[in-house]
Image (cartoon, helix red, strand yellow):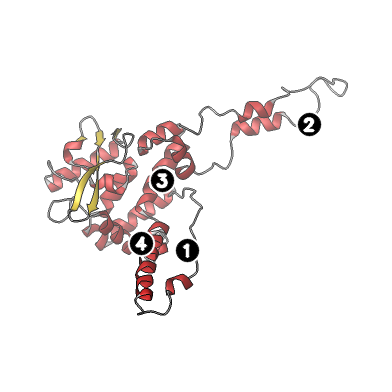
Amino acid sequence: MLVERGYATAKLTRTVLSGVCGWLVRRGALGVNPVRELTPLEQDRDRRARALSAVEVRRWLALLDGDEVARRHDLPELARFMLATGLRLGEALGVTWADLDLTAGRLVVQRTIIRAQGQGLIAKRVKSRASERALMLPPWSVELLRGRRRRTGGFEGPVFPDAKGGWRDRSNVGKVFRAVREGSDFDWVKTHTFRKTVATLLDESGASARMIADQLGHSRVSMTQDVYLGRRAGNGGNLAALEASNPDASPVGGDDDLSPHVSPTPFVQASKSPESPSD
């Protein structure tokens, strides 16, 4: 469960189970609470983003395109849509045709799909004001959506509905994704990986952290930087400053010229960032 559902779900399950066993101990049905004998849960605190590379994106989509189960559950186009927008899975399933302006290539994100106790699947407003946003769609995704509209005759309701035309359960979608990836080289890929892939792509294209946060619907830039953006292997500006500060380099005017070759504070200049990592 820790692997499939995550630390939070595993912790909640363990707490509930411990409570039930504790109640049975108090009633004399159990001698001890076996849950207390289990080893502690270990939370993976490495929150660094892992994204699909361009080659991996093509291979992953080819896997979805060639899998009958994936096609039957409409995963190839859903995956492409999420890679075009960076939406959360619940947000992607909550998009309706009325939210799209395919002429302008524009999408309004305003709801997510959740399962509420006693109500079933419901559409709920997105989690924050920052999550309620308008996004421009890349032309290739506009063509994908136009083809989908022609093929399905969709003008109302969800763009990615269930078999009856209603909202889709994101838990069920996640199960199908896991079934399709099982035994492949992509057993690490989750629906959230698409979101990280979009963030990485924008980061590598030179977009600022604020621009990426706006695309993802984050209110805090620090969330985007800490969780979604992996650290780059190098920074050209830092390299130039460090090279200029080489203490063993020959002075510009020759050995007799003892004047400094570079500014005495290259590290201070190099450490200044164009954008603060916090909100």
Of the image marks 2 and 1, the number of the one nearer the N terminus: 1
| Residue that carries the numbered disc 2 in the rendered image | 247
Residue 96 found in image quarter: top left
The tally of labels here is: 4
| Residue that carries the numbered disc 3 in the rendered image | 197
Say left or right for 196 vs 147. right
| Residue that carries the numbered disc 4 in the rendered image | 181
Q: Amino acid at mark 3?
A: Thr
Q: Amino acid at mark 4?
A: Arg
Across and down, in percent, residue 7 comes to 42, 58
Which one is nearer the viewer's eye here, 183 or 1?
Answer: 1
**Dot 2 and dot 1 residues touching (CB under 8 Å):** no
Of the image marks 1 and 3, the number of the one nearer the N terminus: 1
Q: CA distance from mark 4 to mark 2?
A: 53 Å
**Mark 4, other Cα within 10 Å: few <14 / some 14–19 / many ≥20:** some
Element at badge 2?
Answer: loop
Q: Amino acid at mark 2?
A: Pro
| Residue that carries the numbered disc 1 in the rendered image | 41
**Dot 4 and dot 3 residues touching (CB under 8 Å):** no
